[in-house]
Image (cartoon, rainbow, N blue to C red):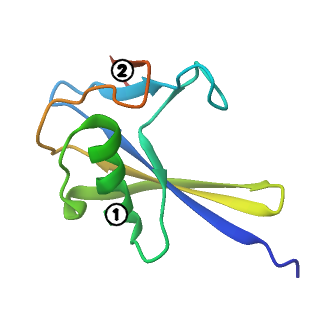
Amino acid sequence: MVNTALMPVVAAVLIREDGRVLVQRRPAGKPLARLWEFPGGRVEPGETPEAALARELDEELGIAVNPRALEPLTFASEPQGARYLLLLVYRCRRWSGEPEARHADALRWATQG
């Protein structure tokens, strides 16, 4: 068995009442620049995934999310060199505040499909 460090990452599918979901575009100069993604980020040591996602949504979008309002949706995993990415995706239908692009160069409410 190979000893690989897990890199837990969380993301949110924010869903408005009209069914649209929020995506953000990665800014120039970052890895995977200009690609659209769901907001989120890394889980810090000692954090639960839900607490990490609430923190990331506050930092990236300026919105407040109760970690108990996050519903597990799906996950993905992939080796990345000496680390192993574990992406945990949550659904969120309730938050306070209006999302703003603090760490992205654009936000878009997209239709689900």
Counting other residues with Cα less than 10 Å from the Cα at mark 1, is it few (<14), some (14-19), or many (20 or more)? many
The percent position of residue 20, horizontal first and vertical second, equals: 28, 24
Could you tell me which secondary element the residue under label 1 belongs to? helix
Q: In this orientation, which residue lies closer to the viewer: 28 or 32?
A: 28
Q: Residue furthest right?
A: 1
Q: Amino acid at mark 1?
A: Glu
- The residue at the point 36 percent across, 20 percent down is 107
Front one among 44 and 7 = 44
Q: Is residue 51 above or below residue 38?
A: below
Q: Residue at 48% across / 66% down in the picture?
A: 44
Q: In this image, 94 relative to 32: left or right? A: left
Which residue is outermost to the left? 96
Q: Earlier in the sequence, mark 1 or mark 2?
A: 1
**Looking at the figure, which quarter contains the N terminus?**
bottom right
Label annotation for residue 50:
1
Residue placed under numbered mark 2 in the picture: 107
On the image, which quarter does residue 13 sit in? top left
What's the CA distance linking mark 1 and mark 2?
22 Å
Q: Which mark is residue 66?
A: none
In the visual, does 19 lie left or right of 27? left
Residue 79 visible in the snapshot? yes
Residue located 21% across and 64% down the image: 68
Give the quarter of the image for residue 23. Answer: top left
Q: Nearer the viewer, residue 102 or 109?
A: 102
The answer to whether mark 1 and mark 2 are in CB contact below 8 A is: no
Q: Which residue is at 16% across, 30% downward? A: 98
Say whether residue 76 is left or right of residue 93.
right
Residue 16 in percent (x, y) is at 20, 31
